[in-house]
Each structure stands twice: as C-alpha cells, then as structure tokens.
Image (cartoon, grey):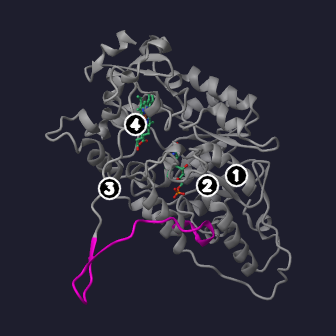
C-alpha cells in the first residue's frame, strides 16, 4: 500500500479496488462519472466509493490488463489509506413561504415518501424519485439527449393515438398473457435494460438505507430480477449493471427466464466470453444495443455533475470535476462500446451463440428489413429513451412503417419479433403498441403492476377476450 500511496495526484493516480492496484491516471479523465471522483481517491483504497455503484468485476472486464499494477496486501492498508464516500452536498436552504395574511414566514416541510398503495401511476413514482434520489443519480436517470425533444415526444406520441372502443362484447373472461420470444409472460411487457441500477438506491439522508432500498440493501438489478419474477415478465439484464452478471443470475428463481442486453466491446473476445457465460446460464435472448456508438450529450446530467463535483473548485480546470465530460464520456464509452460495429459484424454475432439475437435501437423500416434479411430474430424499435440522438422519431410512430415493410419482405410473427420501447407509461400505451403490431414493449421495472391493471381496463373496453394474439399484425 505504501507504494500505491505515492501515486496520489491527478497526474499520477493509482487507486486500490478489492485488493488490486490500478493506474487510473488516464482513465480518470474520461470517467463517465467525472474525473474528480477518481482523482480524489488517488493513492488510496477506493473500494468503499466504488462498491455502491459498480459491479466488482467491471475493472477486469473493461480496463486494459496493463493498468493493473499488482495485488495489495490487505494488512498494509491503514485507515488513512481508505477513501471515504464524499459527504452529500448540503441541502439547499429551505424555501420560505410568505403567508399573505400576516407576512409570517413558514418553512416548507421536508419531503416524506407516500405509502406504496398511494402510487397510482408511473408518474407518481417519477415525482417521488426526483425527491428522494441523489441529485446526481436523478440527473443520470432522467436526462435525455440535447434539447430532450425525443425524450418528451416518446410519451406524447402515445397521446396522439386515440382509442376506438367497440361495445357489447362479453368480456367476463380476459387473458393478457402471451409469449415473448417463446417465454411465457403475464402481459406483453418486459423490463428493459437500464445501466447502474444501484444509483437509484443511493442515500441522500446519510443513514445508509438508500433512497429506494429496504432493509439497508442497495439491491439494484437484483431487486429488478425479483420484481420481474413477481410480475411474471422477462427482464433484459444490462451489460453495464451495478451488480456482477453472476449476482444477477443468482437472483433468478429456478424457473425464471431472463434476456440480456449487449454492448459489443472493441475487444471482441471479451464480448464472446460474456455471451458464452449468458448462454451457459440459460439466458434466452441477446439484445445488441445499436443506437449508442457514443454517449448522447445529456446536458442536464453534465450540468448537474458540474455543480455537484465542480462547485468546490472555483476557477475550475477542465479535468477537475469532469467539466469536459461530454468529450470524456464520449471517449470513455468508446473504450467499452465499439463505435466500429456494423452490418458486417452480424454474422459474427450470430456465430458466437445459439441464443436468439435481436437488435435494440432500430429506428426505420430499412434497418428492420436488413435485420430480418440478416437472419436475426427480431428488433426493438427504440431511440434509447431519447437519451442518444435528439429529434428521432418515437418507436410507436416508426412501428406502422416497419410492420408494412417487414410484411412485404416476407417476415412473419414466427420468424421475426418486433418490440418497441420509449415513453410507455400506462397500460393503454402497451395496448396501442400491440394493436399496431408490436409483440411486446419494454418498460421501466416499477411500471408493470399498475400497467397491467390499466391494460386490463383497455382490453375490457376493446371488448374482446384474449384480444392480443388475434390483433398482432403478424
Ligand atoms: C475509483 C473508481 C471509480 C469510482 C469511484 C467511480 C464512481 C462512479 C460514480 C459515482 C458514477 C455515477 C455518476 C453518475 O451519476 O453518472 C459513475 C458512473 C459511471 N462509471 Fe464509475 N467509478 C469508478 C471507476 C469506474 C471504472 C473503472 C469504470 C469503467 C471502466 C467506470 C464506469 C462508469 C460508467 C459507465 C458510469 C455511468 C456514466 C453515465 O452513463 O453517466 N467507473 N462512476
Ligand atoms: C437510466 C437509464 C439507463 C439506461 N441504460 C441502458 C443500457 O445500459 N443499455 C441499453 O441498451 N439501454 C439503456 N437504456 C435505454 C432503455 O433500455 C430503453 O431503451 C429506454 O429507457 C426506453 O424508453 P423509456 O425510458 O421512455 O421507457 C437506459 C435508459 C435509462 C432511462
């Protein structure tokens, strides 16, 4: 540890994680979470800071092996060598409300979470999340690309589609269950991949319980695996998870089937290894994300990080506080997502696994048809929740043209699956997607239970029991 402690500046920054020393001097400058988080821990053991956010194996998975400087003898790590989680920034002073009658000032009450059964829709969850999450985490979760036009339009697009209910049909028995890529699902919904789920469980109050966690756990993706089982829908495990793949897989119930999302690494052998592990674990389908060759410019997130991390560095230098995060993140993300991935890689993707391979992030009919002709199992019409390229069309709007083109190309629901995501916030949205031809759509994890109720209402209104299988276009 003595040797590591000598490398304690941002120009020469070694950090210990789980007993191994890494040279993060270059990486810190491009760290998606900002340089300061890492350089503040220069020459120290940063495991306590790292563990609540990242999976244990991310360093070996993503960093070049030459940056591992060696193993550190645990006995040599003294308390002063241990980097502590930075104190949460002081809360903004409480707003004063002026009482118009006597001009008295009254403090606004601290936010209290409402009981779970008072949460009637996904927007309720969103407004609570905004209050209880760390501002930095909220920035990461809620931000979209550039002007966030696509982010907003994804949901607006559903509002532009109106219902056309039929009446006087016996709806005593209705059945929302379906099959998604051969996997039984209680409704046409799966939980999509979202990176770094533990971030949502960080603690703003400092009592170690985490914003959304119960029983002192920061259970991130592990909780989502369990929630998917409870809701009876598949979950697409994210590549950039907060838990290791093994931990997520271990959280499955014995009869539970999951899918996986894949960011293709520039070092293809790493992706191959990862995919083999998924296949051996019985994962059913691989969704290769194709809409993120570089990270979207999420300005809300960038601004937030600047104020959070840069506020104590007046006259900031670009590397402090991650001011130049856009460039940094762009470069960082390309260190584990290959921006060179292209159609010629599809045969390779198919050759490394027996799992069904689908593309996540298709945004027009031509590409959907190319995916079909390339022998893939399906695609997700997605603009990455408006987090990547701004002013793209919502998946729900792309859907009709895709279905038509696919039918013309000879695709059927048996040989090519079409899913959509983006802006789905109510069961009625799922209904519209299915009515327009998608086989399922993906949603944020906590959506499903409420969504299923609304979905049921819609199905009742439509007036046909077991409506969906008949109504799906192919
Ligand atoms: C001492 C080591 C590290 C610390 C303390 C750390 C801490 C953090 C924190 C706090 C965030 C959340 C920032 C946010 O709200 O967006 C974050 C994000 C992230 N980190 Fe790290 N990290 C470390 C090392 C690494 C390494 C080695 C990698 C990968 C090679 C990595 C990859 C990422 C990624 C991909 C994000 C998400 C960024 C985004 O999409 O906004 N981190 N990190
Ligand atoms: C916080 C967050 C993290 C995400 N992380 C990933 C990811 O790691 N891989 C990926 O393919 N998509 C990722 N996505 C995109 C989602 O899988 C999905 O395409 C999108 O969220 C759907 O739009 P919606 O948020 O409006 O429901 C992420 C989305 C959010 C909100």
Q: Is residue 442 visible?
A: yes
Q: Nearer the viewer, residue 416 or 326?
A: 326
Q: Residue furthest left?
A: 315
Element assignment for label 3: loop
Alpha-carbon distance for marks 2 and 3? Answer: 29 Å
Q: Which residue is mark 4?
A: 85
Where is residue 111 drawn, in percent x and y? Answer: 43, 65
Mark with earlier residue (3, 4): 4
Q: Which residue is mark 2?
A: 445
Question: Do callouts 2 and 4 mark residues in contact (Cβ within 8 Å)?
Answer: no
Q: Main secondary structure of the magenta part?
A: loop
Where is residue 245 drawn, in percent x and y? Answer: 63, 33
User: Tag on residue 91?
Assistant: 3
Q: Quadrant of the N terminus?
A: top left
Q: Nearer the viewer, residue 168 or 322?
A: 322
Mark with earlier residue (1, 4): 4
Question: Do callouts 2 and 1 mark residues in contact (Cβ within 8 Å)?
Answer: yes
Question: Do callouts 1 and 4 mark residues in contact (Cβ within 8 Å)?
Answer: no
The residue under the point 57% across, 50% down is: 213
Q: Is residue 351 visible?
A: no
Q: Quadrant of the C terminus?
A: bottom right
Circle 3: is it few (<14), some (14-19), or many (20+) Cα within 10 Å?
A: few
> Image check: 444 left or right of 176?
left
Mark with earlier residue (3, 1): 3
Of badges 2 and 4, the one in the foreground is 4
Eyeballing the image, is 143 above or below 267? below
Q: Is residue 103 magenta?
A: yes
Element assignment for label 1: helix
Mark with earlier residue (2, 1): 1
User: Tag on residue 228?
Assistant: 1
Where is residue 84 drawn, in percent x and y? Answer: 39, 33
Q: Is the C-beta of the residue carrying label 3 under 8 Å from the nearest atom of ligand 1?
A: no
């Amino acid at each position: 540890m003595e040797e590591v402690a000598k490398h304690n500046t941002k120009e020469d920054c070694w950090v210990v994680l789980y007993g191994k020393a890494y040279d993060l001097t270059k990486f810190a400058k491009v760290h998606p979470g900002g340089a300061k988080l890492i350089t503040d821990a220069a020459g120290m053991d940063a495991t306590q800071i790292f563990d609540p956010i990242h999976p244990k194996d991310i360093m070996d998975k993503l960093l070049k092996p030459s940056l591992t400087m060696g193993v550190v003898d645990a006995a040599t790590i003294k308390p002063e060598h241990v980097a502590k989680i930075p104190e949460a920034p002081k809360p903004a002073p409480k707003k004063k409300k002026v009482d118009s009658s006597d001009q008295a000032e009254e403090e606004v009450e601290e936010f209290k979470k409402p009981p779970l059964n008072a949460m009637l829709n996904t927007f309720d969850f969103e407004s609570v999340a905004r209050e209880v999450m760390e501002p930095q985490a909220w920035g990461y979760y809620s931000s979209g690309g550039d002007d966030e036009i696509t982010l907003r339009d994804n949901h607006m697009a559903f509002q532009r589609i109106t219902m056309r209910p039929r009446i006087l049909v016996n709806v005593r028995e209705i059945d929302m269950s379906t099959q998604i890529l051969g996997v039984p699902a209680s409704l046409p919904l799966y939980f999509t991949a979202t990176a770094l789920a533990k971030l949502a469980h960080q603690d703003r109050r400092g009592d170690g319980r985490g914003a959304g966690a119960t029983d002192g756990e920061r259970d991130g993706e592990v909780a989502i695996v369990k929630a998917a089982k409870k809701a009876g829908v598949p979950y697409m495990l994210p590549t950039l998870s907060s838990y290791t793949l093994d931990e997520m897989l271990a959280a499955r119930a014995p009869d539970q089937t999951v899918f996986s999302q894949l960011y293709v690494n520039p070092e293809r052998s790493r992706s191959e290894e990862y995919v083999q592990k998924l296949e051996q674990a019985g994962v059913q389908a691989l969704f290769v994300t194709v809409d993120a060759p570089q990270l979207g410019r999420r300005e809300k997130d960038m601004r937030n990080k600047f104020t959070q991390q840069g506020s104590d560095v007046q006259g900031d230098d670009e590397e402090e506080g991650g001011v130049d995060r856009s460039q940094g993140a762009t470069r960082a993300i390309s260190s584990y997502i290959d921006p060179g991935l292209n159609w010629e890689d599809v045969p390779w993707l198919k050759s490394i696994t027996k799992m069904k391979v689908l593309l996540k992030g298709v945004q027009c009919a031509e590409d959907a048809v190319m995916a079909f002709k390339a022998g893939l199992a399906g695609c997700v019409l997605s603009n990455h929740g408006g987090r990547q390229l701004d002013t793209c069309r919502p998946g729900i709007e792309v859907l009709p043209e895709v279905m038509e083109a696919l039918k013309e190309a000879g695709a059927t629901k048996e040989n090519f699956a079409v899913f959509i995501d983006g802006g789905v916030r109510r069961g009625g949205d799922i209904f519209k997607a299915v009515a327009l031809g998608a086989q399922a759509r993906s949603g944020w994890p906590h959506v499903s239970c409420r969504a299923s109720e609304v979905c049921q209402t819609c199905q009742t209104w439509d007036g046909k029991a077991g409506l969906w299988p008949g109504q799906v276009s192919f």
